Amino acid sequence: MEEIKIPNRLEEALQDPKWVEAMNVEMMALQKNGTWEIVPQLEGNKHVGCRWVYTVKHKAEGTIDRYKARLVAKGYTQVYGVDY
């Protein structure tokens, strides 16, 4: 069984076509579902950043099902009453 290197950073993921494809699939799903809309940033407010999280999904027998990339918001950077 081959060892799979799960990237910790975007730069690492961009070196492997399997992870690039997983990120493209995630972006297409986000766009298809209308997950967000771009709006002007209000003066004095900061934007919420995001980061990629990578994992490998396996089938019941242990073989690789797919490479999964998820774009997640850094919600922990928000301050209650200020940012939301």
Image (spheres, helix red, strand yellow):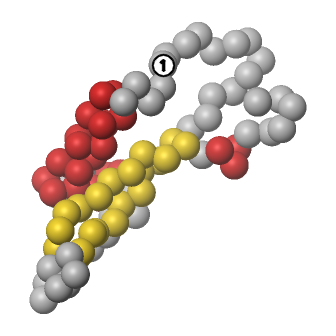
For mark 1, give the secondary structure. Answer: loop
Q: Residue at x 17, y 73 (%)?
A: 64
Residue 41, placed above or below residue 9: above
Q: Residue at x 63, y 15 (%)?
A: 41
Image label count: 1
Could you say where residue 24 lies in the image, as x and y percent from the top left? 23, 41
Q: Residue furthest bottom?
A: 1
Could you say where residue 18 lies in the image, as x and y percent from the top left? 15, 57
Answer with the quarter of the image where residue 75 lies.
top right
Answer with the quarter of the image where residue 69 lies.
bottom left
**Considering depth in this image, is 18 or 65 the residue closer to the camera?**
65
Q: Horizontal placement of 25 versus 44: left or right?
A: left
Q: Horizontal placement of 2 versus 72: left or right?
A: left
Q: Residue at x 36, y 30 (%)?
A: 33
**Considering depth in this image, is 2 or 61 the residue closer to the camera?**
61
Could you say where residue 5 lies in the image, as x and y percent from the top left? 26, 73
**Considering depth in this image, is 69 or 43 the residue closer to the camera?**
69
Q: Quadrant of the N terminus?
A: bottom left
